[in-house]
Structure formats: C-alpha cells, structure tokens
Image (tube, rainbow, N blue to C red):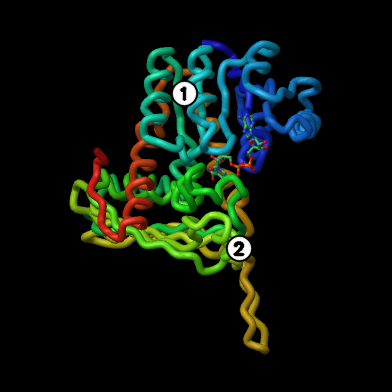
Amino acid sequence: MSESVRVCVIGAGRAGMVHARNVRWHVPRAELVAIVDADLERARNAAEELELEKRFFPDLESALENSEFDAVMITTPTFTHADLAITAANHGKHIFCEKPMALTLEECDRMIEAAKNSNVLLQIGFMRRFDPPFVQAKKQIDEGMIGKPLIVRTLTRGPGLPPPWAHDIRRSNGMLAEVNSHDFDTIRWLGGGEFVNVFARATVNKAFEVQQTYPDFYDTAVVSFSLSNGTFGLLDGVCPADYGYDARAEVVGTEGVLVIGELHSVPLRRVTKSADVFEPRIPSWPVRFATAYQAEAQHFVECILNGKQPQVTGMDGRKALEGVIAANESIRTGNPVSLPLG
Ligand SMILES: NC(=O)c1ccc[n+]([C@@H]2O[C@H](COP(=O)([O-])OP(=O)(O)OC[C@H]3O[C@@H](n4cnc5c(N)ncnc54)[C@H](O)[C@@H]3O)[C@@H](O)[C@H]2O)c1
C-alpha cells in the first residue's frame, strides 16, 4: 500500500478551492500535487495560495504530461465532468467528481464504464453523507429508532445565484441539479428506496433578469416523490434565499421523527427589549458542511489506499441525476413522471 495519494484538482472555482485547501492542509495521507483551471490566471493564483509553485495547468492533458498523480478531483462545471472523468480513468487515475455527476444519463453510464474498465474508483461529491448529523440520522433509521420511514422532507436554499454557466438549464439541468442534487440523494439514501414517481413544479420569483436570457430558468421549486418501498419524499429549493444558506431535512417514521440541521450557525441567540431576536445565520455551504467536505475527501483517499469501494458511487450519482431529469420533465409537461426513465 502506498504512503499517500497524490491528487490533482481540476477547477479552481468555488468548490475546487474548498477541496484543494482540504487536500493541501486537512486530509491526512493526501498530497495536492497540481491544480488545473481553464482560466490560467485563476490557476496561477490558486497555485500561489496553495504553495504549489509552478504546478498549475490550463487543462488536464498538460497536467497529465507534466506531473504525476494518482487521483483527480473534478470540480468544473457540470457539462465538462464526463470528458474529464473519462480521460482521467483512461490514464488510470481515481476519480472524485462533484455533483451533479454529469449532464445526461448516457454520460453517467460512460463514466461508470470507463472507471470500471480502468479499475479506478469513482466517488461522487454528495458530502451530506459525511456530515455528522446526517450520518447519525441514517444510523438511527437503520437501527429502527423511528420505525419505518414514511416521509423524507429535505430542502436546500442558497444565499446567492449559482454561477452564470448554471443559469442555462441545457448546460446545468437547472437549480434542481446545481443546488438540490443533494436533496435527491438524501431522499434515496434516508428513504431507503428508489424513485418510482416524481412530480415537480417550478417558477421564477426573484431572478427575473436571468429568465430574460434563459426562458427555462427557475429559482423556486417543489418536488414530490414515491419511492419503491412506499416511502414518500418531498423537497424544495429557493435560490437566491437572501437569509443565508439553509439545508435541513426531516424524516417521519412509524415510531418517531428525526430533524436534521438548524437555521443558525452556532447556538447563540440575542433577545433585546425592542423584541429583536438575533441568531447568527449560516452564511454559505463551505461553512455549513466544512466537516463533511473534509470527511468525504478523507474517505476517498482511504478507499484508494485500502482498495475499497467508496460509500457514494457513480450509480448514486446517476440515480440522483435521473430524479433531476424526471423532475425537469415534470416541470416542462405539468405531469408526473415514472422512473426508471426509458
Ligand atoms: N458539493 C457541493 O456542495 C458543491 C458546491 C458548489 C459547487 N459544486 C459543484 O462543483 C462544480 C463546480 O462548481 P463551482 O460553483 O465551483 O463553479 P465555478 O464556476 O466557481 O468554478 C468552475 C471552475 O472550473 C474552471 N473550468 C471550466 N471548464 C474547465 C475545464 N474544462 N478544465 C479545467 N477547468 C475548467 C472554470 O474556469 C472555473 O474556475 C459543479 O459541478 C457544482 O455543481 C458542488
């Protein structure tokens, strides 16, 4: 077994820098050896911050030619994931790929196939599966502490609009993919079944200026699900939600309920005689899920070192995307959609 895993991060944007900083400083037995970004200036600045000297590159191919690594973390826009993952797999590199796994199910299938053929690991960035309250909830459901799950409710509301490339639904699958992917995964994971039916509604309430350029754009959505084991799922998304970052879930079972997550970031509340109540809000996802991002990267490295399959696989990424695609179809047609998709 090697001593450490050498990692190249591809994409030095918002998610990429979270992972790059973790791999560089917070993940034992991981070594950040290179950073790639199509925007070379961004790559250069990232390399400087990460103390990587000259090991920054404009594309994966030049990183492959000029540095040695065992694994990639793909943190670029969704429409680039499949090509990058397949190139990495073909060069024998293990793959951590941010959610949403890809743009189409066909891309997901090719990624899974490439990883299998090259005998490399493929982990998808559903970090909620490594967040302590979510992990505890899953354990308690599996131990039967709330009986059989009846309804999984989950929500994600983001403080700002997603990056401009995500405004075009054809290049991102929209807010349900970009922001709510995690909820689709959470409903499958905590609900313990597969999506068999999805009904979704969406509209624009805030970002009217984006809708002018992209008529299919939506910033508010609700989705309901039936799972194969009879459990129901419900999710909602609003982005931008001006009050901060909000990611919570609730699982109602035959014998109890689990409530996961808080609206505020630390247990501090101020109440004054003017009747104002102040609780510090959660500013952003890197803050709310800081522990989970580290833990998922740690898990990826440990799986590589120990030859184990990751807990969150390409198939999990594919199933979540299938739910997103079905929900977008439901929004378009106004009808419920049955799964699996043909
Ligand atoms: N797990 C999470 O909570 C989470 C949070 C945010 C974003 N994400 C995901 O991470 C991915 C990136 O999102 P982001 O918000 O960081 O985007 P971003 O726009 O901030 O950053 C993307 C970066 O990738 C670079 N890039 C684009 N194409 C490239 C290519 N072919 N090769 C190399 N670099 C390229 C861009 O120049 C940019 O710097 C998306 O899939 C997104 O859904 C996940």
> Left or right of 147: which side holds 77?
right
Compared to residue 177, the image places residue 241 above or below, namely below
Q: Which residue is drawn at the image coordinates 64% and 82% (left, top)?
A: 276
Number of the label disc, if any, that sits on residue 209: 2
N-terminal of the pair, mark 1 or mark 2, is 2
Instruction: Give the label, 1 or 2, closer to the camera.
Output: 2
Residue corresponding to mark 1:
303
Residue nearer the viewer, 237 or 23? 237
The percent coordinates of residue 337 (x first, y second) are 26, 51
Residue nearer the viewer, 84 or 236? 84
The quarter holding residue 109 reads: top left
> Left or right of 37: which side holds 256?
left
Question: Regarding mark 2 in the picture, which secondary structure is present there?
Answer: helix
Quadrant assignment for ligand 1: top right
The percent coordinates of residue 25 (x first, y second) are 69, 32
Amino acid residing under circle 2: Glu
* Whether residue 165 can be seen here: yes
Question: Which residue lies most toward the bottom here?
Answer: 274
User: How far apart are labels 1 and 2 at the CA level?
Assistant: 44 Å
Q: Residues within 10 Å of mark 1 (few under 14, many from 20)?
A: some
- Label 1 CB sits under 8 Å from any ligand 1 atom: no
Question: Regarding mark 1 in the picture, which secondary structure is present there?
Answer: helix
Residue nearer the viewer, 287 or 54? 54
The percent coordinates of residue 125 (x first, y second) are 49, 37
Q: Which residue is drawn at the image coordinates 43% and 13% (left, top)?
A: 118
Q: Residues within 10 Å of mark 2 (few under 14, many from 20)?
A: few
The percent coordinates of residue 321 (x first, y second) are 38, 41
CB contact under 8 Å: marks 1 and 2: no
> Left or right of 293: which side holds 41?
right
Q: Quadrant of the C terminus?
A: top left
